[in-house]
Structure formats: structure tokens, C-alpha cells
Image (cartoon, rainbow, N blue to C red):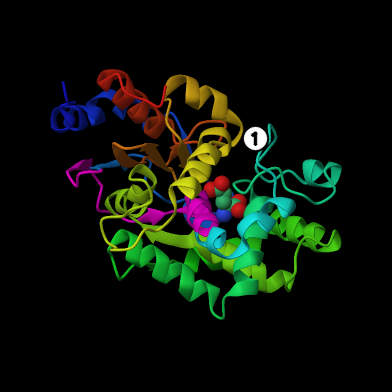
């Protein structure tokens, strides 16, 4: 029997609201510290185009590391196989901004979703595109169908002023020959990708191609090939939730990517894309109520990739 998404999605806030004040809003990026912890948005878009959403699903928030999925998808079109000689495909088992791991592994980041890996992906885009910032924005706008999506310059500036560890990672990559371009130029793209302001409604649209064999509902041509979709989804499943990826697979069972802005996108291949936002984070850096909402969804529908 098909899942009654309408009823399930309406029930979700009541199931997770007790967690809103149990998480911790990211405050290491000063511009994010003031976001109210009781915000909650949820949007599910089926491959057949039906939409089920609730709460603050139209309110924009900071995409943060969820952007790494989209820069990777964009870069896959340019770097092809050689990308994988510069970035690995294994879970990191370490903090998302670990310098120790990068040094130990001689400047080759474990995967494209830890900060160092995403900085290398940004380097690929800087090498291939005249205006990579604009190209990324255009990509997000077309995929989401929202042409006023933009960078939040306050967040980008806040990260540029305080992102000392990201600067260290980029310099370390450069020192090890794994960055072709100027460190500042690459970091400018990295800080801007993380600053994109986007809603759950828009994120569910932007991710739909990952649930729909590479086809979005906003474009005639495919966004990614089925093989590229397989790769992005497998990386989300194994590397998308910081150092809690096993726990998330155990509880939720979907390829997913989180960000410290409190957003998570999830994909049930062939069925739906889903985006949830709740700013309070668990100790791993994943949205506490967001993870619980996705766990409720996959449990009550008895559907996950497993
Ligand atoms: N802009 C954040 C950083 O580089 C991204 C963190 C995240 O969402 O994982 O620290």
C-alpha cells in the first residue's frame, strides 16, 4: 500500500518538537549563533511530483555542508575520473575538519564531503569555470526552480573572518600539490557555497534528480547520469553525516547529507527527495530533531534503502 505521506508529514512536528531545545545551534560560525532553535521545516517531493510539507518549509536557512553535494555534482561534469586521484571515497571516521588526518594521508582528503575534500572540489570548479560562484548559483537556481536563491554575504564574511581551520586545510592542500589555484580564490568559493540561503522546499526540489535517475522536475535534460547518481548517493550514505554516518544509516537508512545550519537532505532512490531543517545540533553536528524526523518517516513508512 502506498505511504500516506500527507498524514505522516503532518504528524512529524508533534513527534520531534520535544527535541528542539535539546540540541545546540552552531555558534562557531558567529552569523549562525542567533538562529532560533525552535524553527522546523520539512518538505518531501516524490519522483512523480507530489509534494508534502510542513512548518517553516519555505523559510531559508544556511545550507552549509549540504552544498558539498551540489558542488560535487557540478564538478563531476568537469573532472571525470581524475577527481578520484585527488579525493578519496571512504568515510573519514574523524572530525570533518581534521588537519591530523589530512597530514597523515599526505594531502589527499578521505572524501568530498569533509571540508578538505570539498575545498579540492571547489578547486576543480575554479580551474574549469570563469565565474564559479555564479555558475554554482545558477546551478542551484535551475535545480530548485527558485531564481532568487543567493549567497548570504553576512554568513560568507563571518566564515571568511573566522575560518582559520579551513584556511589551514587549504594551505596544507596547496603545500602538498593538491590545489591548483590560489588558496584565497578557492576559499572564497568554499565560504560562499556554504553561505547559500535556501529553504526545505527548494532543497527538496534541488535534490530530486538524485531520487529520479538523474532527472529533475525543472530541466528537460538529465542533471547527472544514472552512474553519477549512484556515486553521489553512495557517498552520501557512507560519508554524509560527519562522524555519525553509521548511526544515521542504522536509524534512518537513507543516503543523506547534513550541514551545521541544521538542514539534512535525504534520498529514497526512485521514490522521493526530502529536506528537513531544525537548527539544534547533536554532538556530531547533525540536526537532532531533523534526524529524528527522518527516522520517523522511514520507520512509519517501512521504506528505506535497506
Ligand atoms: N562552513 C562550515 C565549515 O567549513 C561547514 C560546516 C558544515 O556544515 O559541515 O566549517
Residue 20, picture quadrant:
top left
Residue visible at 27% across and 23% down?
A: 15
Q: Is residue 244 left or right of residue 175?
A: left
Q: Nearer the viewer, residue 105 or 158?
A: 105
Extent of the magenta region = 47-73
Residue visible at 73% across and 43% down?
A: 98
Across and down, in percent, residue 109 comes to: 72, 47
Q: Nearer the viewer, residue 49 or 296?
A: 49
Residue visible at 33% across and 45% down?
A: 212
Residue pointed to by mark 1: 91
Element type where label 1 sits in the image: loop
The correct choice, above or below, for 288 with respect to 143 in the image is above
Residue visible at 64% across and 65% down?
A: 124
Locate the N terminus by quadrant: top left
Across and down, in percent, residue 64 comes to: 50, 53
The correct choice, above or below, for 270 with respect to 251 in the image is below
Amino acid at each position: 500500500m502506498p505511504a500516506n505521506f500527507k498524514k505522516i508529514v503532518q504528524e512529524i512536528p508533534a513527534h520531534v518538537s520535544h527535541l528542539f531545545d535539546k540540541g545546540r545551534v552552531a555558534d562557531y560560525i558567529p552569523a549562525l549563533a542567533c538562529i532560533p532553535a525552535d524553527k522546523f521545516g520539512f518538505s518531501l517531493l516524490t519522483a512523480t511530483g507530489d509534494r508534502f510539507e510542513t512548518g517553516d518549509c519555505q523559510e531559508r536557512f544556511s545550507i552549509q555542508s549540504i552544498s558539498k553535494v551540489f558542488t560535487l555534482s557540478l564538478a563531476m561534469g568537469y573532472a571525470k575520473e581524475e577527481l578520484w586521484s585527488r579525493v578519496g571515497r571512504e568515510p573519514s571516521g574523524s572530525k570533518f575538519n581534521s588537519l591530523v588526518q589530512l597530514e597523515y594521508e599526505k594531502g589527499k582528503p578521505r572524501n568530498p564531503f569533509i571540508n578538505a575534500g570539498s575545498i579540492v572540489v571547489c578547486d576543480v570548479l575554479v580551474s574549469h569555470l570563469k565565474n564559479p560562484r555564479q555558475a554554482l548559483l545558477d546551478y542551484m537556481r535551475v535545480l530548485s526552480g527558485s531564481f532568487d536563491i543567493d549567497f548570504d554575504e553576512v554568513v560568507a564574511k563571518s566564515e571568511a573572518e573566522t575560518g582559520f581551520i579551513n584556511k589551514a586545510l587549504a594551505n596544507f592542500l596547496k603545500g602538498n600539490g593538491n590545489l591548483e589555484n590560489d588558496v584565497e580564490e578557492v576559499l572564497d568559493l568554499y565560504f560562499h557555497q556554504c553561505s547559500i540561503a535556501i529553504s526545505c522546499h527548494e532543497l527538496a526540489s534541488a535534490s530530486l534528480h538524485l531520487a529520479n535517475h538523474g532527472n529533475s522536475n525543472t530541466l528537460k535534460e538529465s542533471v547527472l547520469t544514472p552512474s553519477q547518481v549512484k556515486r553521489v548517493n553512495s557517498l552520501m550514505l557512507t560519508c554524509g553525516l560527519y562522524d555519525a554516518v553509521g548511526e544515521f544509516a542504522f536509524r534512518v537508512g537513507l543516503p543523506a547529507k547534513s550541514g551545521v545550519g541544521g538542514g539534512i537532505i535525504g534520498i529514497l532512490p526512485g521514490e522521493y527527495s526530502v529536506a528537513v531543517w531544525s537548527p539544534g545540533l547533536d554532538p556530531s553536528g547533525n540536526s537532532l530533531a531533523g534526524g529524528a524526523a527522518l527516522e520517523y518517516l522511514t520507520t512509519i513508512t517501512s521504506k528505506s534503502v535497506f
